[in-house]
Amino acid sequence: MASLKALKNRISSVKSTQKITKAMKMVAAAKLRRAQSAAEAARPYSTGMAAVMASLAGRVEPGPQSPKLLVGTGKDQVHLLIVCTSNRGLAGGFNANIVKAARRKAESLIAEGKTVYFYLVGRKARAALGRLFPRQIVHQYDTTEIRQVTFADAQAIAADIVERYATDGIDVVHLFYARFQSVMVQEPVGQQIIPIPPVETREGQGAGVPAAVEYEPDEEEILAELLPRNIAVQIFRALLENAASEEGSRMTAMDNATRNAGDMINRLTIEYNRTRQAAITKELIEIISGAEAL
Amino acid sequence: MADLHFELVTPERLVRSEEVYMVVVPGTEGDFGVLAGHAPVMSTIRNGELAVYRTQGAEPERIAIEGGFAEVNEKGLTVLAEKADAAA
């Protein structure tokens, strides 16, 4: 049995760990609130964008002169996976889940004989994916300096992606991030962003809208301008969702850690008390038997 | 005459959502004013200033915007801009 002194040390060390995890939980909760409101504030824009995209895409006939970002290159040989993760750990399974989703997709693509490249956003994916696919990481976008994601960041990433798409012979681009459902649930998702997956045209709705919209300049020019912007919006949304998911995941993880530390302290305290009592009893027995011997 | 429903949205937030009299939008092919009941139009915009007239003949409120597009449909005018700055 451990000595009294050793037990006391254990308890105080677990207590200080508990203080840290508790503080991290509080910080994550505060950050989560901010991230969530940022994600909500961005919603009207992306809904508006989606509506415009849908109305435009339905109107432009896909043809050989259509923008590549909309219709693709006609092949699906080379895939680029954009993997968005956080820069810090201690967020439970947050990063691992995203990486796992991306890896599964990559492996199934490779099994089909496709070429796969990775584009990493955030620091945490590098360790896991770098080990498995060391040659296939084309770029890592550094987000360590970014505190609050702005649209400019998303635009920078989008511009980079669009340029690589145009020059590096990439056919399909996927985006991986964690969709924020609740504080407890963050679901890793993979989504194709280039070419844009065909929008389901709802017949009933489409027929009611008058086709007399005037375009200034014409549809194709608007579309050409809109497409890169749409990608930026998608990435922006992914980054915001990711930020909220990260803090949510961290909060849950730290809450668990705090609770575990509490349980451990209880157990150690009981053991400490028992040991103390055993020591006292032993001393008493020694004194009594000493007195009897006289 | 019914008021025009005007929305100005940036990726970061919903800047304006209100009923106004008229908005002058800096389109890439020239400025155009939008009143209630305007025909559906979709236009890209250049960097410039939106002029929002709350009531007829009132001093316009100017909002600097950058990049994006404007859509007029039966519900009103929606401006999706990348940046918007209310130049007070």
Image (cartoon, rainbow, N blue to C red):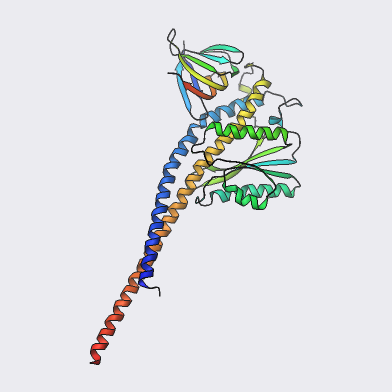
Question: Of all residues shown, which one is farthest toward the top?
Answer: B57
Q: Quadrant of the C terminus of chain A?
A: bottom left
Q: Quadrant of residue A18?
A: bottom left
Q: Is residue A123 left or right of residue A293?
A: right
Task: Please state the horizontal and vertical placement of residue A132, each as a whole percent of the image.
Answer: 66, 52
- Looking at the image, which residue is at 72% across and 24% down? A61
Task: Please state the horizontal and vertical placement of residue A290, each as a whole percent of the image.
Answer: 26, 88
Residue A98 visible (yes or no): no
Task: Please state the horizontal and vertical placement of residue B54, each as a whole percent of the image.
Answer: 44, 13
- Give above or below for A142 relative to A214: below
In this view, the residue in front, A287 or B22, is A287
Residue A11 visible (yes or no): yes
Task: Please state the horizontal and vertical placement of residue A161, each as a whole percent of the image.
Answer: 65, 35
In this view, the residue in front, A128 or A219, is A128
Q: Is residue A116 left or right of residue A258?
A: right
Q: Quadrant of residue B30?
A: top right
Q: Quadrant of the N terminus of chain A?
A: bottom left
Question: Of all residues shown, which one is farthest toward the front?
Answer: A145
Total labels: the figure holds 0
Q: Quadrant of residue B70?
A: top right
